[in-house]
Image: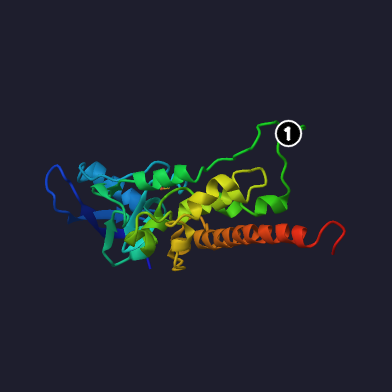
């Protein structure tokens, strides 16, 4: 069986300057074993139809900008090989659940705002430099957050999430995974700043455990796990606040020296 041939791509088009109605357009693209969907789109744009709009940058699964729905599944176009679909039409559509600007280009403002809200950076109470010039971490401390730091903000997880599809206020998978990544970082002291955001009405408690976010992540991040762990952290903190008055009561009921 050969991995070369000609593929048919059925690409969703939306050109608001020409028509308010979206439509599909079919293109043919030659492929080899190593040709990815992004290569085919570039081939089409260069040789057949320069009006086709889509995003990409790194072509190596790092920048997170080339996401699209490919035969119904959110994937990176630069990491999806044409030979996988041998003999089948490849339907390429914009990521679901985001407003479409043009063709495969979606408006990502909502995700960007959520990303900023969870403060994806190390927060310190006081910026006193450590005595030896750097904050040291053990391997065990790094293990607590490292998989969640692989997120490339590609938004495939939002496109796969039915809860986000129904309620765009939902904080969602990637933003929560990144919040959890910083909360679990031993150098960070920003838990109290992030907690109100991730535990608000549209925060982690909206998640219904579908888990598609973790299935489609191209970097092996498990946002569903981060969401569930964040729920546990929140429940533990709430439990502690309930225990405090009881401690106070103990102090009253059991005066000094009592047991
Ligand atoms: Fe950068 Fe695909 S082009 S992730």
Query: Around disc 1, counting alpha carbons within 10 Å, would you say few (fewer than 14), some (14 to 19), or many (20 or more)?
Result: few
Note whether residue 230 is visible: yes
Where does the image place residue 101, in percent across and percent down from the top left? 25, 45
Note whether residue 3 is visible: no
Q: Which residue is mark 1?
A: 130
Q: Identify the residue at horizontal 67%, vertical 58% (top origin).
A: 245
Q: Quadrant of the N terminus?
A: bottom left
Q: Identify the residue at horizontal 70%, vertical 38% (top origin).
A: 135
Q: Quadrant of the C terminus?
A: bottom right
**Quadrant of residue 56 in the image?**
top left
- In the shown orientation, is residue 226 left or right of residue 163? right
Q: Identify the residue at horizontal 31%, vertical 63% (top origin).
A: 71
- Farthest residue in the left direction? 19
Where does the image place residue 195, in percent across and percent down from the top left? 54, 51
Where does the image place residue 235, in percent across and percent down from the top left? 58, 62
Work out whether residue 180 or residue 140 is closer to the camera in this orientation and state it: 180
Taking 191 as reference, is 253 above or below it?
below
């Amino acid at each position: 069986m050969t991995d070369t041939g000609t593929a048919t791509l059925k690409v969703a088009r939306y050109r608001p300057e020409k028509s308010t109605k979206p439509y599909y357009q079919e293109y043919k693209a030659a492929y080899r074993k190593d040709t990815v969907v992004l290569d085919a789109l570039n081939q089409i744009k260069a040789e057949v139809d320069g009006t086709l709009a889509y995003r990409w940058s790194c072509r190596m699964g790092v920048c997170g900008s080339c996401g699209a729905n490919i035969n119904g599944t959110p994937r990176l176009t630069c990491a999806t090989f044409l030979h996988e679909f041998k003999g089948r039409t490849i339907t390429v559509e914009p990521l679901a659940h985001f407003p479409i600007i043009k063709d495969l280009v979606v408006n990502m403002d909502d995700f960007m705002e959520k990303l900023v809200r969870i403060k994806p950076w190390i927060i310190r109470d006081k910026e006193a430099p450590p005595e030896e010039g750097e904050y040291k971490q053990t391997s065990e401390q790094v293990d607590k957050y490292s998989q969640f730091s692989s997120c490339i903000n590609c938004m495939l997880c939002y496109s796969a999430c039915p809860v986000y599809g129904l309620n765009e206020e939902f904080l969602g998978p990637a933003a929560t995974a990144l919040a959890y990544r910083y909360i679990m970082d031993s150098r960070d002291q920003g838990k109290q700043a992030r907690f109100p955001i991730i535990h608000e009405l549209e925060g982690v408690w909206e998640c219904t455990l579908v888990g598609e976010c973790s299935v489609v992540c191209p970097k092996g991040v498990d946002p569903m796990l981060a969401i569930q762990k964040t729920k546990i952290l929140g429940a533990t903190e709430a439990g502690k606040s309930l225990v405090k008055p009881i401690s106070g009561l103990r102090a009253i009921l059991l005066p000094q020296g009592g047991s």
